[in-house]
Image: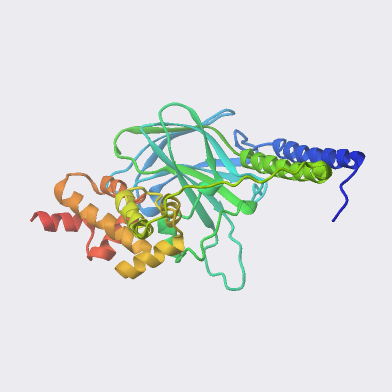
Amino acid sequence: MMKPPGKRLFVWLLSGLTAGGLAIAIAMASVPDYVVFPSQDSFKIEAYTDASNNGNSKVELLEVTDSMTQMSFSFGEDFHSPYVGLSFTPLSSSVVDVSKYNRLTVEIQGIGLSRVGIALYSIPERNSSYEGPAESLNHSYLNISDQRIEYHLPIKQFHHPEWWEDVYGITSNTRRKPDLSRLLHVNIGTAFTARLEGCKKLRIDKLSFSRDNRLLYLWLGSLYVLLSGFLCFWRFRGTKVAHPTPVVEIAYRPVSVDEVGSKDEACINYINTHYHLSDLSLDKVATQTGSSPRFITQLIHDRFGCHSKAYLNGIRITESKRLLCKTEQNMGEIAFVVGFNNQSHFNRVFKSECGMSPSEYRKQERE
């Protein structure tokens, strides 16, 4: 057994541990934000619309100053899912490296808007077998208000949207986290909007990548307590006074077989009652029910003979049928209410399941 350190060595080791932890914490705290806007010399700001998809939304005014970017626009008619947005593209190089940041900060205001979508486009990692798109899209939604508010979005919140995964055949096995080492551009655009009429405004006062070090500090603090505790134990273990170990009796209630079996029902019930959440995923169901994604996937396959996504879409389509027959809500509202973020994706899934579009189904049921 190793001999306990002397007092001088103990002080040196503890001081070195403290200095190392503080150096890491200070280094991470001193990482400056990567400012996308306001920084007109580094990024080009452009407006985009649904014109590329045969839409007719129109940008009335785009104003870019040293402190804010503001766009006034109107949605076009006779287009199933109109959209307008702003694109921030680096000028100095084709890509920028923001991989050391774990949070996106945006100060934003919307007039006539309640929700926007934020998209991070990057160059995906390629190998000899890669056959995917030239750009990788990771996306997140943000609820906004008519007041200027600063929001902080964790990068881990960004995922491939469902329609992107459907188009490029991306599965849970091929899904990748955002690669911010080769960022191409950032887009901020309108998401689902219940009222399309009238002039809308989108204002952005700040857009930057930053670090949230709270988890790192917690990890460093825990490691410091553990290592310093070990050093103290190593130093003073020779002077430890032995005490008899008391006998402790613990009363507990055994877990019943019924409780274990109810785990299956908990997973199914959670999906059945939370299908309307657009961000519902296997990981979220697993976290809320104390299960694993693999267990839920196998449970749904054994009980219903289908994949988990097909089961979830089946519930959403069933509810959308009821709303199509019983209410006067438009297609976009129904898509949003049952859990679809994108009306085009809703139309595609509905037609795949029912052999006709939602509007054709409503017409057929009301004749």
* Residue 333 occupies quadrant: top left
- Left or right of residue 289, residue 216 in this image: right
**In front here: 37 or 337?**
337
Q: Position of residue 141 (x, y in %)?
A: 44, 44
Task: Name the residue furthest left.
Answer: 367
In the foreground, 302 or 206: 302
Res 106 seen here: yes
**In screen coordinates, is 299 left or right of 6?**
left
Quick check: can you spot residue 307? no
Image quadrant holding the N terminus, namely bottom right
Task: Give x and y (percent) for residue 72.
Answer: 41, 33
Left or right of residue 75: residue 65: right
Task: Look at 38% across and 45% down and name the residue there.
Answer: 83
Outermost residue toward the bottom?
129
42, above or below 255, in the image: above
Q: How is the image coloured?
A: rainbow
**Which is more toward the observer, 255 or 264?**
255
Front residue of this view, candidates 256 and 133: 256
Left or right of residue 317: residue 160? right
204 lies above or below 244: above
Q: Is residue 304 above or below residue 193?
A: below
The residue positioned 26% from the left and 64% from the top of the image is 353
Q: Residue at x 45, y 49 (%)?
A: 252
Residue 198, position in %: x, y? Answer: 31, 33
Residue at horizontal 28 percent and vertical 60 percent from the top? 314
Q: Quadrant of the C terminus?
A: bottom left
Location of residue 351 in the rendering, given as x and y in whole percent from the top left corner: 26, 62
